[in-house]
Amino acid sequence: MALLQFTIVLDFMILSPLGDILMKSLEMTTVQFGSVVSAYAISAGISGFLAAGFADKFDRKKLLVFFYTGFILGTVFCGLAFNYETLLIARIVTGLFGGVIGSISMAIVADLFSLQQRGRVMGFVQMSFSGAQILGIPAGLFLATSFNWNASFFMVVIVASTALILLLAKLKPVTAHLKLQTTKSPLKHLWKTLIKREYLWGYFAIAFLSMGGFMIMPFSSAFLVNNVMIKQEELPLIFLFTGLSSMIIMPVIGKLSDKFKKFHLFTAGTIIACVMIVIYTNMGPNPVWLVTLINMILFMGIMSRMVPSTALNSAVALPADRGAYMSINSSLQQMAGGLAATVAGLIIVQESKGSPIQNFDILGYCMLGFMLACLFLVYRVSVQVSKAKK
């Protein structure tokens, strides 16, 4: 599961460090680049929503194999893209398949591990975010600067193909949830899960969590290169150390979330992230070591929010609804992220290819507002889960 998540995260996150290269190579505006980022997220959200009714009707392994194969083919098309239009279409195709994989993976984890173990397990699985920064993004940037940006996507294809072989060979069928089904119609199952009052706080929480995280990410490399005066060759170093710090903190947070209240850990991560996002988005020219340090602390705060909130959210749904609930959550997360990327592309301005990014600080303050709103929503989820346990 961690290896699968690694490839999904890498495929999405690679656009951020490649942002400056892509905008210059394909002559894209900030609005067009925002559209490329949001195209994946919105199509992923739509496919996840449509697949939600079927998520609890089949062996989860078979679903995972089907969608992961489509994801690999979509990534091949990304590597073959030659202009803005073809890249946009390729990202839509990749999102249609990739958007479902995370929810299926999390449903498998929730099926196989109790809530008392889930924080540790999800902390391990979500180390894929750190792994993508430590290994994938620096390697992708190296390939992009040494050859061309297309090579970065072909790297993802090679790793993902290896993961698919391991998935087929090692993962056993996951079918226990099939015995709990009471509704035969996938659409009825989707509708019943969607309108359940008990699930609404979880839906809102995941959407705001995504909105708060996606706003600055797509344009961070362009900001670092054009505003903070970091060289393209220095970006892999920043992402390397940022990923290392995240990889260290996530297993620790996972273990702590099984021992202490998950909401308290989420609150601590939110406070750190809020402070650092204001510092980060208001930076001017700075030495690479200071930018790396700020980036490390920022991502430690962001990752400290992900593990406890995901573990809490996984406890909201009943086992019979878990696949559909996770798929709906994944859809909302993707669509909210796509909306955030689109809005970000409209807010920021870049007059020419090498000119500074304007209004990046405004994005930071918008992100701050979403994080604080998410804090309240996760609190409501925490209260709901506590009552259900009693």
Image (tube, rainbow, N blue to C red):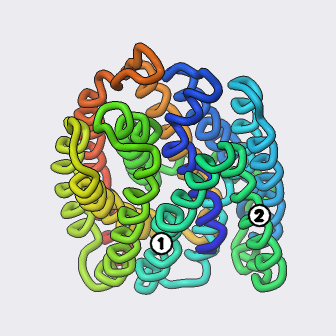
Badge 1: how crowded within 10 Å, few (<14), some, or many (20+)? many
Q: Quadrant of residue 65?
A: bottom right
Badge 2: how crowded within 10 Å, few (<14), some, or many (20+)? few
Q: Quadrant of residue 81?
A: top right
Question: Where 167 falls versus 206 (above or below)?
Answer: below
The residue depicted at 42 percent of the width and 58 percent of the height is 239
Q: In which quarter of the image is the N terminus?
A: bottom right
**Disc 2 and disc 1: Cα gap in Å?**
20 Å
Question: Where 227 falls versus 269 (above or below)?
Answer: above
Residue 279 disc label: none
Upstream in sequence: badge 2 or badge 1: 1
User: In the image, what residue type sits under mark 2?
Assistant: Ile
Task: Report the mark closest to the observer, 2 or 1.
Answer: 2
Question: Where 95 falls versus 131 (above or below)?
Answer: above
Q: Going by the image, does 387 lie left or right of 178?
A: left
* Cβ atoms at labels 2 and 1 below 8 Å apart: no
Element class at badge 2 = helix
Residue 158 disc label: 2
The answer to which of 144 and 170 lies nearer the viewer is: 144
Q: Quadrant of the C terminus?
A: bottom left
Element class at badge 1 = helix
In percent of width and height, residue 68 lies at 77, 60
Q: Going by the image, does 355 lie left or right of 5?
A: left
Q: Going by the image, does 203 lie left or right of 147?
A: left
In percent of width and height, residue 187 lies at 74, 46
The answer to which of 265 and 35 lies nearer the viewer is: 35
Q: Mark 1 — residue?
A: 127
User: In the image, what residue type sits under mark 1?
Assistant: Met
Furthest-top residue in this view: 351
